[in-house]
Structures are given as C-alpha cells and as structure tokens.
Image (cartoon, grey):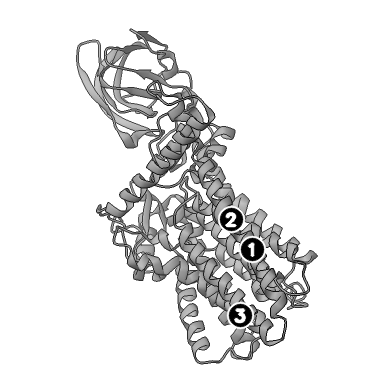
C-alpha cells in the first residue's frame, strides 16, 4: 500500500498503477451508484382519451373497491370513475402526476368501473384496482367506448408495485427534464425550455435504450456522475503530480453526498459539472504544452478540446458561461505572462506570430464551434416546429435556416426573460453564503410509513465541503502571506487555475437576485476540494502536517458518507435515525423538520 501511494516521479501523466487505481475506483463507484437507481419494470403503453370517450373495466365479479392506482402519461384533464350503482368519483390528472403511481382512495362495491373523460385530456399508462384488503384485483377486460385503446390500461399489470416510491416514479425536476427527454424522442410539444437542450438530449439516450422507465431516464446522469471520477483523478495527477493526491481528489469527490444524490436523478446539473471539469483539465493541459519545445499544432489539441467542452457545457446549462469567464482569465493571463517572459529573454519576435495563430484558432474553437454546438442542440425544437400543421414557412434550405435562427433567438429571449423575472420562492431555497457550509438541503423525495421514512435530499457532505471551504480560505491566506513563493512553478499555476475556477463558478451567484439552491454550488464544489488538497499537500511537503493526515480526512469522509447515505439515497430508515441526522449530527437541515 505504501508503495502504491508513493509520491513517484512527479509526472503529471498517468502510469500503469495510476490507471489501475483509477479504473478500480470508477468501477466500484459505478456499480454502487447504479444499485437501486430505478426500476426497469414500468408501463410503456398508454390509453389516451378526450371528452366523451370512456372505457369500461370488468372486475369479473362484484368487488369491494378501496382504491385505484393510476400511472399517468403526459396530459392534464378530468374524468369520472363510476360504479354500477351510479356512485362516482372524480379523477383529476395534474401536471406533476406523470410517470409515477398515484393512489386515489375510493369506496364502493361493483363489478364494473366506467372511466369517462369530461375535460381536457387523460393519458394513463396503467391502472390497478385495489380491493378492501388493499390487494390488486385481476381485471378481466377493458372495453373502450367511443374511441381510445382501453386495453393499454391493463396490458402491463406486472408493473404494478407494492407501493409507490422514488424507485418507480418521477421525483423533483424529473417532471421537467425527463418529460422533455421523452418529448424530444417522440417529437411532441416541448414543455421545458428554461435550460438549453443538450442535457435533456443526453437523458433521452437512456430513455431510447431502456424505455421511459425510472432507470432509463436516470442511467445517463448516473454514468456521467461516475465519469467525473476519472476526470477528477486526471485533474489531481495534473495538479499534484502525485498518485496519492490524485486518488484523494477522486475518492473524496466520490464520497460527497451531493455528487451522489445529484447525479442519480434526471436533471441537467450533472452534465454542466462534468463539462466544466473537462474544460479546466484541458486548459491545464494546454498551459503545460504551450512552451517552445512543443510544436504549435500539438498545443492546439488540448486547447481545442477545452473549447469543445465549453460548447457542450453551455449547451447543457447557461452557467457554463461563468466557467468560460474563468477560462478566459486563465488563458489570457498565461499568454501575457509568457509574452513578458519571452520578450525579456529575447524571443519576442517568435512569440507574436505564434500567439496570433493561437488566437485565430481560439476564435474557431471557443466561439464558432461552441456556437455551432449550441445551434445544433436545438434540433428537437426545429423538428417539432417544421412538422406542426400550423407551420407556414418555406421548404427551401434557406427558408428552413432562417426559421431555425428565428426559433433559436426566440428561445434565448424566452429563457432570459424567465430567469431574469423569476420571483418565486421555495421551501428549500438558500443563499450563496450558506452553501459552502451546507445550511439547507434541497428535498427531492420524502415518504413515511409508520416509524420508517425514506428520503432523498441533495446536500454537500460536511466532511468534504466544510473542510474544503476552510481549506480554500486557508490557501488564500497562505498565498497572500507569501508562504508559497518557494513552491515550483507548476504548483503556482495549479493554484491560480483552481482559484480562478472557484471564483468563476461561485462569485456570479452573489449577484443573482432570483431564488437559488444549494445545488447551484455543485460546479464549485470540486474546485474547493482541489484547493483544500493543494493546501494539504503544501503543508505536508513543508512538514507542517504528517503524511497520514490526508488519510484521516478520507476516513472521516467515508464514515460521514455511510452515516448520511439513507438521507440521500432513498433507503428506508427509522424515524429516530432521521432525527439523529437532522438534530444531532452536524449536517445542516436535511428533512426541514419533517421528522
């Protein structure tokens, strides 16, 4: 073990032992994060009906009905559920009830149930009738009246769960992002437009592979969450040039509860964090490569990859622009300092032609190509508009291109208007100065059954975030006090790049007037972790802290992760344990008083 984590030759590149360690960590985490992610056993066929259409369910014999479970599709409307004796209940299909099981209490004795739509549209994937013991009734037949595919209500009865939970239905903002992924695939009217489309298109890949199931809409975010670990390892090896610290960077990030919870639901935040990490990894690679010993074309590889990552990030969420500002500061600072150095050393004549070519390359890879990526990410919007019956544009290539530009511009105007004018408040909202110390979690899911509760909240692990926040401030003080002057240049560069990333991803939120949440700190979290590790490495190599200190931090983070796992994974836990997490263990508000 000591040999495995030896400091090594101080190379920023991976060796054989690095790769084995990296892939082992990633494999273990991937298997862990996919466990209990969501069911694949979920109804896929829907009965859709409009006012005047109905379906009759035959229960086979007179039955005491206590409740009916509905699994909805994308629709809003109202219908009646009527028994033989004329008794009826109203069922209202609401916006947030899609792709999840909803139980409606009813009480009558009947052989048949008639479902008749009288307002809006009803779309149901499956239905289950429960008897007075709460057991599903074997409905023998569903006969449509005046249209509709009534048989679809009963063709997947094996998907009916024992109880509804996060495992077999949508939670939190999945009702926006996973729904939109489904609409992209089926060329339907697109509901969620408040973020660029790429993240939802990536979610749609999972849906295309595994169906419109909880596993299907969550699997791609979960895999991107696992893929962050190799990127963190690569960043760590680049920054620290030590295997032990590269492993610590990836392992501590794996043990962060926000990283775990946020990447196991179908929202777009995971994608922007992944692409931001890639941006800064490639920018560090470029700075390392940009020297006289390297041909200019070779420096273009990491620089171009950085620009493409920037484009993919912005096409997932506008906050990628924040990270882009940090990239620009790092890039131009590097160029200016290199120009000053080479001019002093008498190589200024060679520096300027090289710089002009680099800047020209950047116009392509940081403006034109990201612009093209962003433009192409809106293909589902263009396709839907072109296939609408009301589309009145021309069919020529130029006409279509003009219409695509109009749609793109209109979407950006709507998006900006939405975010700039948003005045809504939320139970889970928090402000930027509360985030590093995890004052208030964001609730994704909560249910209770007697003394047992199940919960999914997203929040930073105090064992990772609190230590990282203090470490970042301490690193700044060390820097200001001049106690890092003896560090090699590659360390100083790493410190500057990581702190620039912290500032770029965090400081803009200080000026945002709208309702904000702790997960808005997610793109900053990996960089304050790297900042704290930079400080720890500095203190260790100057003899201020022992080498085993870093393993103590990892151990505490692992214990904290295990303690907090039920609060961020949905695993059932006794209410008394939830109270321990809420009121005894230093964490911040996880259940907001619900336990």
Labelled pair 1, 3 in contact (Cβ < 8 Å): no
| Circle number at residue 309 | 2
Q: Say if 505 sits above or below 310 in the image.
A: below
Q: Is residue 71 left or right of residue 86?
A: right
- Residue 340 lies in quadrant: bottom right
Where 248 sits versus 188, above or below?
below
Question: Which one is earlier in the sequence, the residue at label 2 or at label 3?
Answer: 2
Cα distance, mark 1 to mark 2? Answer: 9 Å
- Quadrant, the C terminus: bottom left
What secondary structure is found at the residue carrying circle 3? helix
Q: Are there few (<14), some (14-19), or many (20+) residues within 10 Å of tag 2?
A: many
386 or 593: nearer the eye? 386
First in sequence, mark 1 or 3: give its number: 1
User: In this picture, is 507 found above or below 101?
Assistant: below
* Rendered location of residue 136, percent (x, y): 40, 24
Q: Report which residue position mark 1 lands on.
A: 282
Q: Which residue is at 67% across, 64% downward?
A: 357
Q: Residue 337 has which mark?
A: 3
Q: Which label lies toward us, 1 or 3? A: 3
The answer for how far apart the CA atoms under marks 1 and 3 are is 19 Å
Q: Nearer the viewer, mark 2 or mark 3?
A: 3
| Gap between marks 2 and 3 measured at Cα | 25 Å
């Amino acid at each position: 073990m000591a040999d495995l984590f030896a400091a090594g030759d101080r190379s920023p590149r991976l060796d054989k032992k690095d790769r084995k360690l990296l892939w082992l960590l990633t494999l273990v985490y991937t298997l862990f994060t996919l466990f209990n992610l969501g069911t694949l056993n979920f109804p896929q066929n829907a009965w859709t009906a409009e006012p005047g259409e109905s379906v009759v369910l035959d229960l086979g014999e007179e039955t005491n009905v206590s409740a009916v479970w509905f699994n909805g599709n994308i629709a809003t409307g109202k219908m009646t559920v009527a028994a033989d004796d004329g008794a009826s209940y109203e069922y209202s299909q609401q916006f947030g009830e899609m792709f999840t099981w909803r139980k409606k209490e009813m009480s009558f004795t009947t052989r048949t149930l008639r479902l008749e739509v009288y307002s809006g549209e009803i779309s149901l994937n499956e239905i289950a009738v429960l008897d007075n013991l709460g057991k599903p009734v074997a409905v023998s037949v569903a006969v449509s009246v005046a249209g509709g595919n009534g048989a679809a209500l009963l063709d997947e009865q094996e998907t009916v769960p024992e109880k509804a939970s996060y495992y077999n239905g949508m939670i939190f903002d999945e009702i926006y992002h996973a729904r939109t992924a489904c609409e992209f695939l089926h060329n339907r009217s697109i509901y969620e437009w408040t973020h660029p489309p790429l993240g939802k298109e990536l979610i749609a890949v999972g849906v295309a592979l595994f169906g419109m199931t909880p596993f299907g809409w969550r699997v791609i975010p979960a895999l991107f969450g696992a893929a962050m670990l190799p990127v963190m390892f690569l960043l760590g090896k680049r920054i620290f040039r030590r295997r032990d610290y590269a492993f610590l960077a990836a392992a501590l990030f794996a043990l962060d509860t926000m990283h775990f919870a946020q990447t196991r639901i179908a929202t777009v935040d995971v994608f922007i964090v992944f692409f931001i990490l890639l941006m800064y990894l490639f920018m560090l690679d470029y700075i390392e490569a940009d020297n006289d010993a390297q041909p200019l074309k070779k420096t273009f590889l990491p620089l171009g990859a950085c620009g493409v990552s920037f484009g993919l990030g912005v096409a997932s969420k506008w906050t990628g622009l924040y990270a882009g500002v940090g990239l620009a500061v790092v890039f131009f600072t590097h160029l200016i300092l290199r120009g000053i150095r080479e001019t002093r050393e008498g190589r200024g004549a060679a520096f300027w032609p090289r710089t002009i070519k680099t800047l020209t390359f950047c116009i392509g890879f940081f403006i034109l190509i990201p612009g093209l990526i962003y433009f192409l990410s809106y293909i589902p919007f263009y396709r839907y508009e072109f296939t609408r019956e009301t589309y009145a544009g021309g069919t020529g290539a130029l006409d279509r291109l003009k219409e695509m530009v109009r749609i793109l511009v209109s979407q950006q105007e709507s998006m900006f208007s939405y975010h700039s004018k948003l005045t809504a408040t939320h139970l889970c909202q928090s402000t930027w100065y509360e985030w590093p110390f995890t004052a208030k979690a964001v609730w994704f899911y909560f249910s209770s059954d007697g003394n047992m509760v199940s919960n999914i909240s997203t929040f930073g692990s105090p064992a990772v975030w609190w230590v990282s926040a203090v470490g970042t401030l301490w690193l700044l003080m060390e820097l200001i006090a001049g106690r890092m002057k003896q560090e090699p240049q590659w360390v100083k560069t790493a410190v500057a790049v990581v702190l620039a990333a912290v500032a770029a991803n965090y400081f803009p939120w200080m000026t945002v007037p709208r309702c904000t949440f702790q997960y808005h700190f997610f793109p900053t979290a990996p960089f304050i972790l790297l900042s704290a590790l930079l400080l720890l490495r500095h203190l260790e190599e100057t003899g201020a802290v022992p080498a085993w200190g870093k393993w103590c931090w990892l151990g505490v983070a692992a214990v904290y992760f295990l303690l907090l796992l039920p609060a961020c994974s949905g695993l059932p836990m006794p209410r008394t344990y939830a109270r321990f997490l809420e009121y005894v263990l230093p964490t911040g508000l996880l259940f907001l008083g619900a336990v």
